[in-house]
Image: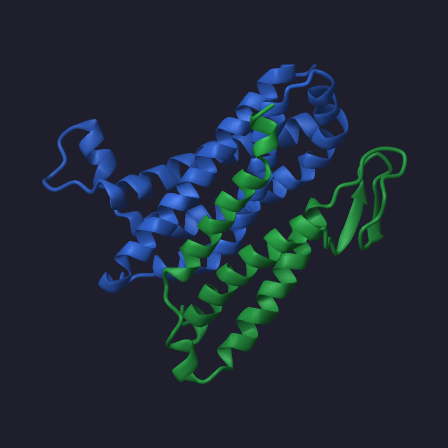
Amino acid sequence: MTIPRSFPVFAIVFAVAYAVAYAISVHNNYALFTYHPALNEFGVGVQKPKDGPAMYWYGWLATAGIVASVAGLLACYLPQRLTSRLRPSFSWAVPLAVMVFFAYLLRGYFLR
Amino acid sequence: MTTALLIIHGLLAVALLGAITHQAVSVWLPARKPAGSFVGRFRAVPGVSYANAVVVLYLITAVLGGIIYAEYRVSVRVVLEQLELWKTNGVFELKEHFAALGLGMLPAYWFYWRAPLADEHARTRAVLTGLLAFIVWWNFLAGHILNNVRGFGS
């Protein structure tokens, strides 16, 4: 299978943008939609719980996925002198940093 | 229905765990001589042959996990909070975020494992594989612990 020459640019930018967008989405609750599991109901944007908990995780995934896809596709059209500065290590270093960020963010669960 | 999906999710997770662990060991502890022992053969597998399987298994396992997550949120998490099992709850919170972050790394992981393997990307390949292996192991153990807290069918 042949893949576009710009795919590595897309893959690196996608990994970086996805991790950052996901972290920001969770931290600021920028969920694209809300799911109310007790009612089996979806709602646009961030909604308050109604008759049971509200789930934002799916919405965060959607927000991060869209942001990362757009960023990755746009990066494919950048001139090579810019994209050549992208290092393959960005594709793991940024997600790793975001994993550490979440461990810090959720430390309250483990320090009670 | 949820129980059936949970079992399928668990079985796929076992397959994913085996594939990513084989691959991670093959890049981090490669066999230096012809393998004779079980451990030696475990280390000597060609990592490249696992990449597509890992991507597909990760995606399907994540989708199934996402489907049963709603039932967890309604029926299990509330109980964990009532029992004040904060660490257990925290382990699951990390599971959901790690799983999400793993999804974002899949395109890069898949690309750097494409044959023929480029020597200059060996470190990227190794770290991406190691990170995904960590996520899969964390999520597998977290899911196992969570399942055991309430017990099967409770």
| The C terminus of chain B lies in quadrant | top right
Q: Is residue B124 above or below residue A69?
A: above
- Residue at 26% x, 57% y is B122
Taking the image as drawn, is residue B112 in sight?
Answer: yes
The chain coloured blue in the image: B
Q: How is the image coloured?
A: by chain
- Residue at 74% x, 18% y is B82
- Residue at 38% x, 41% y is B20
**Tag count:** 0
- Residue at 54% x, 30% y is B10
Residue A28 at what x, y percent from top left? Answer: 70, 52
Query: A98 or A67, which is in the foreground?
Result: A98
| The N terminus of chain B lies in quadrant | top right
Q: Is residue A26 above or below residue A69?
A: above
Question: Image check: B106 left or right of A32?
Answer: left
| Colour chain A is painted in | green
Residue A20 at what x, y percent from top left? Answer: 56, 57
Toward which corner of the image does residue A1 lie, by quadrant? bottom left
Question: Image check: A44 left or right of B95?
Answer: right
Query: A75 or B22, which is in the foreground?
Result: A75
Residue A5 at what x, y percent from top left? Answer: 40, 76
Q: Is residue A64 above or below residue B33?
A: below
Q: Is residue A6 above or below residue B107?
A: below
Query: A56 or B147, which is in the foreground?
Result: A56
Taking the image as drawn, is residue B8 in sight?
Answer: no
Toward which corner of the image does residue B41 lie, by quadrant? top left
Question: Image check: B44 left or right of B83?
Answer: left
- Point out the residue furthest to the left here: B33
Residue B110 at what x, y percent from top left? Answer: 41, 57
